[in-house]
Image: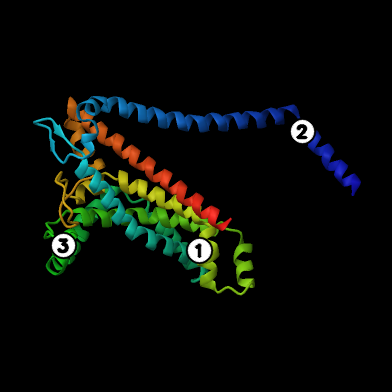
Amino acid sequence: MISDNNSSQSESRSRSEAEKSLDKGFIWLTRVLGIGIGVILLAIALTVAYRALPAIQQYGLGFLFSSSWNPVKEEYGALPMIYGTIVSSAIALLIAVPLGVGTAIFLSEDFIPLQIRTALVFLVELLAAIPSVVYGLWGIAVLIPIISNVGRFLNGTFGWLPIFSTPPVGPGMLPAGVILGIMTLPIITAISRDSLASLPPELRQASLGLGATRWTTIFRVLVPAAFSGIVGGIMLGLGRAMGETMAATLLIGNSNQLSASLLAPANTIASLMANQFAEASGLQVAALMYTGLILFILTLIVNILAEWIVSQVRAKYN
């Protein structure tokens, strides 16, 4: 036994200087790359803030609460776009999170044969590769007619509610939110499934061995253990929903008017920038960059909130 320990120690000490130098070089390389990501992120934020500085000086925080967007009079306000970005992303999450996490659980457990699961996993991942413009065109041809029929029913039956107070006119907040939910679904599903599949099998075996049912094991053991990965997938999906341009532009209606109705046309920050940036000049460019800075801050707040939620869950189960 002693000889085995001595031999293992001698082998560990026999590493050449080249190997040690390679390890040190790899460590420094990862440090440089990690710092580089932070530097790139800071450079993007500073560039956008610098280009937005004229609008910040002109409108200040009132830009966040104004609903006027008139390039002719140089009157700019981002409230309808901020509202549209948040609400359309919220609709997307309401659709994609339960479906995505549920599909991930279904594909990570032995509910169906392995061959069928493999094919379904491939199809889910294939959805993420479809270009956004294809989603948008499919939404115009298929989704809007369906939602228009549903919207007329909702407006006629629940028109006294502010969210259904206007009749559907085709493009609007609800079609955009639904298509964003469909687009974020494969991201949430794939990452959540990978998080669940990477858990040690001992967790499942120990829970079942203690007498827990299959569903208790899934929701009380496996999902909490994979919670950080699931939240990471949700945040990536939310980031795509908030920053999606083409599909949202085709389906949301591109109206800069603030409306509480989900059936009315609306706008998002990404759609506004895609529609107007090519022809913008002067103060309008600064106003568009100001909206881009707001979107940057919104995503930062969302990620901070996600980290806080994950830390709270970890503290609870630790």
Name the one closer to the observer, 139 or 313.
313
Q: Residues within 10 Å of mark 2 (few under 14, many from 20)?
A: few
On screen, 198 above or below 114? above
Name the one closer to the observer, 148 or 166.
166
Q: Measuring 25% from the left and 43% from the top, which residue is drawn there?
A: 82
- Helix, strand or loop at disc 2? loop
- The percent coordinates of residue 191 (x first, y second) are 46, 53
Q: Measuring 25% from the left and 41% from the top, which residue is drawn there?
A: 269
Q: CA distance from mark 1 to mark 3?
A: 36 Å
Q: Which residue is mark 3?
A: 148
Label 1 amino acid? Ser
Q: Is residue 95 left or right of residue 21?
A: left
Q: Earlier in the sequence, mark 1 or mark 3?
A: 1
Q: Earlier in the sequence, mark 2 or mark 3?
A: 2
Task: Please say if the residues under marks 2 and 1 sit with CB atoms less than 8 Å apart.
Answer: no
Q: Is residue 166 left or right of residue 38?
A: left
Where residue 108 is drawn, which disc sits there? 1
On screen, 61 above or below 90? above
Q: CA distance from mark 2 to mark 3?
A: 70 Å
Q: Residues within 10 Å of mark 3 (few under 14, many from 20)?
A: many
Label 3 amino acid? Ser
Q: Earlier in the sequence, mark 2 or mark 1?
A: 2
- The percent coordinates of residue 185 (x first, y second) are 37, 56
Q: Measuring 20% from the left and 51% from the top, which residue is drawn there?
A: 251
- The percent coordinates of residue 19 (x first, y second) are 71, 31
Task: Please say if the residues under marks 2 and 3 sit with CB atoms less than 8 Å apart.
Answer: no
Q: Which residue is mark 2?
A: 15
